Amino acid sequence: MAARKICSYCGKKLEGKREYLSEQVKEAEAYCSAECREKHKEALQKVRKNMKWFAAGIVCSVLLVLGSAFMEASESSMGHYMTGTGMFLLGLTLILFPYCTPETYAMFGYVKTNRIGRALGILTALFSLWIFCKS
């Protein structure tokens, strides 16, 4: 595997900089500073700790949206409320726990990826408000 071109935490280019490699996987993670390496280590521990809340939020929102599909959401205002609530819960989950794929982390770094995840959560929450207003 080739050496990384960006910092695993902040996403800054590493060209011409001393790389602070991870102790565990030297080629998979590289950092622009020791501070970024420590911040990333702490952030990943937080992600692992919050994974159960992320999963619970996703499961609940999917169940609400699927439940509304069985209630014939197009003809029932209750179905619209369930869909809107499910979408809002999904958006809130993405804002609070912006888990993204490892490939996205590798492409943009941890900080930028979390910003992208939170932005998608805000868009999802705004979409849920549109669903509420529509009903």
Image (cartoon, helix red, strand yellow):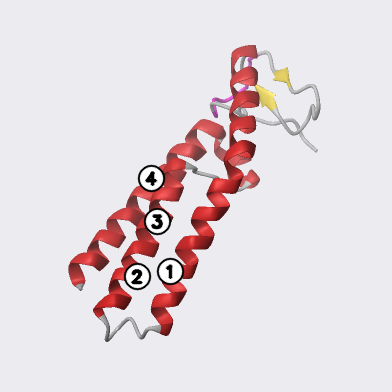
Q: Say which residue label 3 marks.
A: 89
Question: What range of the chain is rendered magenta?
Answer: 11-17
Is mark 3 in CB contact (under 8 Å) with mark 2?
Answer: no
Q: CA distance from mark 3 to mark 2?
A: 10 Å
Q: CA distance from mark 2 to mark 1?
A: 6 Å
Q: Amino acid at mark 3?
A: Leu
Q: Amino acid at mark 2?
A: Met
82 displayed left or right of 11 = left
Q: In the image, what residue occupies the spot 43% across and 38% down?
A: 115
Report x, y in % for residue 51.
60, 44
Q: CA distance from mark 4 to mark 1?
A: 22 Å
Q: Say which residue label 4 marks.
A: 119
Q: Amino acid at mark 4?
A: Ala
Q: Quadrant of the N terminus?
A: top right
Q: In the image, what residue occupies the spot 74% across and 34% down?
A: 28
As helix, strand or loop, the secondary structure at mark 4 comes to helix
Q: CA distance from mark 4 to mark 3?
A: 15 Å
Q: CA distance from mark 3 to mark 1?
A: 9 Å
Report x, y in % for residue 131.
26, 67
Q: Say which residue label 1 marks.
A: 64
Q: Say which residue label 2 marks.
A: 82
First of labels 2, 4 by sequence position: 2
First of labels 3, 1 by sequence position: 1
Magenta segment, principal secondary structure?
Answer: loop
